[in-house]
Amino acid sequence: MMQREQPALIQAGMGVHISSARLANATARLGAMGVVSGAGLRHIVVEDIRAGDLDALRLARAFPFPRYVEELLAYAPGGSRHNKPVPMDTPDPARAALPRRLSVIGAYVEVMRAKEGHRGMVGVNVMWKCALTVLPTIYGAMLAGADALLCGAGVPMELADIVERLRRGEDLEYESLTGTGTRVQLDVAEDAPASLLQRMPPPTLIPILSNYPFCKRLTDNWQQRHGVRPGAFVLENHQAGGHNAPPRDKSSFGAQDDLDSYFEKVLSLGVPVYVAGAFPHGGSRDDLLMWQARGACGIQVGSRFALCAESGMRADLREQMLAQVRAGTLTVSTDLRLSPTGYPFKVASLPGTLSNPELRAQRTRLCNLGYLLQSHFETGEDGVVRETYLCPAMPAAQYARRGGDPAQTEGRICLCNALLSTAGYGPADELPLITLGVSGVQVDRLWSAREVVEDILTPDYVARRERELRLPA
């Protein structure tokens, strides 16, 4: 087996399908770690199958469990579910299995697309706050041979346990996935022979965190309970795009939230560290060398890849973004209220998108995709505890009927529909929303993924790694 060379560059897992398989494939074959976004893959892959995408159909048929294949191919042209909506997660046991299985095979197809044609490293970004798809996404990614699991938007305390138990072929259930308040489960044993699961290579586990206490707690927990340590940490500064860790004073970010305030302490844990979002030079080679000189293994770069030619962002939106950068009018701000997760969220200003509060107010609220649903338990008059799902982005009346406080819906928008629209998968009447890191305002032209990787790692290095990672003829 070829000796793995520790990558100095991780291409970030962004948005819904911004870090697409196409982008991850392009970066992985050049010596960086390519990363696909695990968010919304049930929807992405079903819609590709519905559209008759030949690569998706071919890879779906290679999935090892026939039932999953049949259920996904039912959405293909001529299939029994071709015109039916993608099912949402539900607490109803009779209907819960189908969306979980579609999420498993969706992750498998996307990771396989990213891995085709090279021997580079491919990871999947698992958004912890999408609690109901955490287990299926990890399972499908592992079946596809993902090299790494990168987990952000939460504290993945159970990650090492999940991987260990999946490789033993155990059914999984967690009463409350850390930081989500959501009960999650996945049936594995009935479909998967233990011999297959034991052959799944253990992926490198890379939590994405933003303070020392969580890094310390997670390292100690994994070591004591499982005898493993994180393969690396991505330390994400609050200038990064997407979700950020909440500010310590609850209202605004300050010096106490800056990566400088905890970087050296995390290094002392002896776990390799990558830096994200703290790039005075816009995510360039200068930033890589600066952080490596301070002891980091490398950097994770997002915004430059989000705006490159191979990303999953709609071309028209990307062109508008680059034009605004050249005009000096693009701004990136932090919205503390917008995301249903309760985490701060970076928003790039762009006319005609949901960065405009007036357009957000005009949108008809609905919850029809459900990737950010969370468990809610109520005891009925009969004394029976019943589970339902809530999301603060759903209509306030629906939220209240299910036992939620309507005040929690104020200012929230549906990230599921908005981010799918940004990638070209949303309905025509759904407006997009673009998230970008602060350094993204420095990207003033269309780069290719190769140009970005070469700019950070040098053309000579990339050429050597590309030769080494090429599959034999």
Image (cartoon, rainbow, N blue to C red):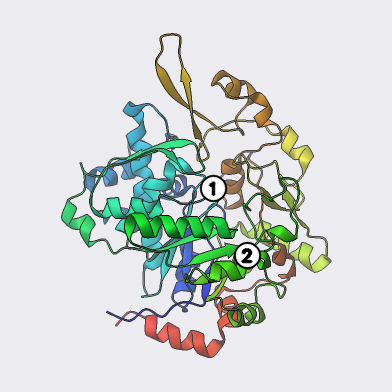
Report whether 196 appears left or right of 254. Answer: left
Quarter occupied by residue 471: bottom left
Q: Is residue 210 above or below residue 171?
A: below
Residue 347, image x and y in percent?
71, 52
Residue 342 visible, this angle: yes
What residue lies at 49% left-to-right and 48% top-to-bottom? 128
Image quarter (top left, top right, bottom left or bottom right) of the N terminus: bottom left
Question: Label 2, label 1: how many angstroms apart (C-alpha)?
Answer: 39 Å
Looking at the picture, tell me which residue is in the foreground, 417 or 297: 297
Q: Is residue 5 above or below residue 253?
A: below
Report whether 94 appears left or right of 291. Answer: left
In the rendered structure, find residue 186 and report the number of the disc placed on it.
none
Secondary structure beneath dot 1 equals loop
Quarter occupied by residue 173: top left
Residue 228, image x and y in percent?
35, 62
Q: Earlier in the sequence, mark 2 or mark 1?
A: 2
Secondary structure beneath dot 2 equals loop
What residue lies at 21% left-to-right and 48% top-to-bottom? 192
Residue at the disc numbered 2: 262
Residue 243, image x and y in percent?
62, 52
Toward the bottom, the furthest residue is: 460
Image quarter (top left, top right, bottom left or bottom right) of the C terminus: bottom left
What residue lies at 56% left-to-right and 42% top-to-bottom? 416
Question: Count of labels shown?
Answer: 2
Looking at the picture, tell me which residue is in the foreground, 423 or 177: 177
Residue at the disc numbered 1: 425
